[in-house]
Image: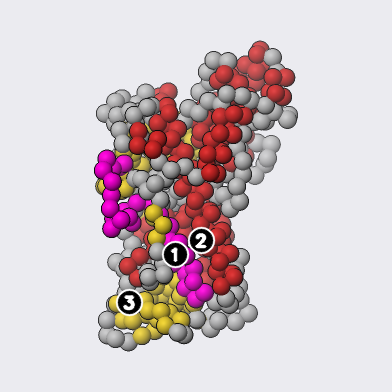
Amino acid sequence: MKSIGVIGNDIAAWMAAAFFAVQPASQRPNISIFTGASQGCDDSIQNPIPDFSGFLSLVGVSDQQFISACAATPTLGTCYKISSQYELAQSSHNDFYHIWGEYGSPLGAIEFHQLYIRAMLEAEHSDLNGLSVAALAAKNNRFMLPSRDQLSIRATYQTSYSFLTKNYIQWLQHLCKKAGVQEDSRPINYLLKSTDGYRIEFHSGDKAGADFLINTCPKLRDQVASCNSWREFIPFTQVTRKNTAQERRRLVSDVEFGHNEWRITRYAADSQETTTYVLPDEPVSEENAELFSGCVASPRENQLLHLGRALINLHSPLVCEVDLIWIALRMLQQFYPALPDGPSAASEYNQRLIAAYENLRDLSQAVYIQVERKLPGTFAAINHCKVSSQLQHKLDLFVHRGKLPAYEHEIYKRQWQQWLLLGLGAKPSRIEPITFHLSPAEMRNVFNKIKSAVSSEVETWPSVK
């Protein structure tokens, strides 16, 4: 493989170009990016999960360098505001801070979430936000970096970053230029498939190609790349996106639920972005299928990879665009540099990638299902949606035993999923018998010690300004 071509000018295109530019290879292929196919960056805000740090490590950039280059700010997770109407006042007990980490701590062989379920079943109410140092810190707008000392309470959570897409792309462009990536800005008409591979056709009629192409533009997908719509599972469409000056400094993104709609607000250094999604009342025709979440059925041909918006359209409070791109690139690491060798590698890559996205799709649907159970009528139509067999297995097992199975290629950690369901009001009917080895008094003592330790720790943290 002597050449790699990336088609696009958006976040997926520049991430892919940077990914290939820094990959180790005995003879590095020529890397070109064809930017005449899309309008490029927008004003959106990226708020990826902590796995994003893997991309920074791949391109050889420290967290501090990234923060400085992209004006990134730290984040701890998501705040879910469970209300039947946006207009209703949000009381503090309705806000659940779902952080990337742990609530409480195991007690020997007893998992803490099982102890929390027991307290729920015995009507011993305990605010989850007071059982996690990161959740309480986010609630009180205080922050400290996590610790590497596993005995420290500051080792119980992870952090990520929030940043503007335009800042991120400018930084990626700098990395690519430094690594020798060649840019071709000629306007593009088509992506053509011929007997000898894929070729780009420009407005001028000229053609260009490479041994391997990455396409990030949905309008350039060929006829083979049909899109599987997920509207039977999560039938939400984006209806508005609004960017405004930041009104307050937040360590979490905010998710608010209303009647048949929900909205996500993400925060960056000096701005905030609110995206509203709606569950349509009327069926939508096949022509509008791509308005809904979906995934390309064959994300990788032997010599072509669809990436970013050309591959995935997933609306979720759990992940953002950077997450989806990095999942695909990280999986591609297992196959590089043997990219165009034949159908077997492409088939395995396709299966793994689609499974990873379907896991996220199912978990997003689980959020809607749980909100509907907690507040009937909020997402009434979700009761008639299709549920995958693996999601049904997860929900049934969690309700029955307070346990969650782990499926292959899951991105979202199982402990994050457990606390997400509990925080949204899931109430398992049974717990593990070992949990009853503690007396009620001992159990209350455990909770009180955790609350005291969490509160004392957070009081020492500086406020975020």
Q: Which circle marks residue 307 in the picture?
A: 1
Residue drawn at (28%, 46%) of the image: 283
Going from N to C along the chain, the mark reached first, 3 or 2, is 3
Q: Is 186 located above or below residue 172 in the figure?
A: below
**Residue assigned mark 3:** 190
Q: Is 173 located above or below residue 293 in the figure?
A: below
Drawn side of residue 398 relative to residue 191, left or right:
right
Residue drawn at (33%, 56%) of the image: 290
Q: Is 440 located above or below residue 322 in the figure?
A: above
- Cβ atoms under marks 3 and 2 closer than 8 Å: no
Q: What amino acid is found at the position of numbered circle 1 in the picture?
A: Leu
Foreground pick, 97 / 260 = 260
Residue drawn at (35%, 33%) of the image: 380
Foreground pick, 373 / 40 = 373
- Tag 2, which secondary structure? helix
Q: Is residue 8 visible from the viewing direction of this image?
A: no
In the picture, the quarter occupied by the N terminus is bottom right
Q: How far apart are marks 3 and 1 (CA)?
A: 17 Å
Foreground label between 3 and 1: 3
Colour scheme:
secondary structure
Instruction: Please tell me how many numbered marks the rendered image carries.
Output: 3
**Residue assigned mark 2:** 328
Q: What amino acid is found at the position of numbered circle 2 in the picture?
A: Ala
Q: How crowded is mark 2: few (under 14 residues within 10 Å), some or many (20 or more)?
A: many
Going from N to C along the chain, the mark reached first, 2 or 1, is 1
Foreground pick, 6 / 167 = 6
Magenta range is 278-307
Q: What amino acid is found at the position of numbered circle 3 in the picture?
A: Tyr
- Cβ atoms under marks 2 and 1 closer than 8 Å: yes
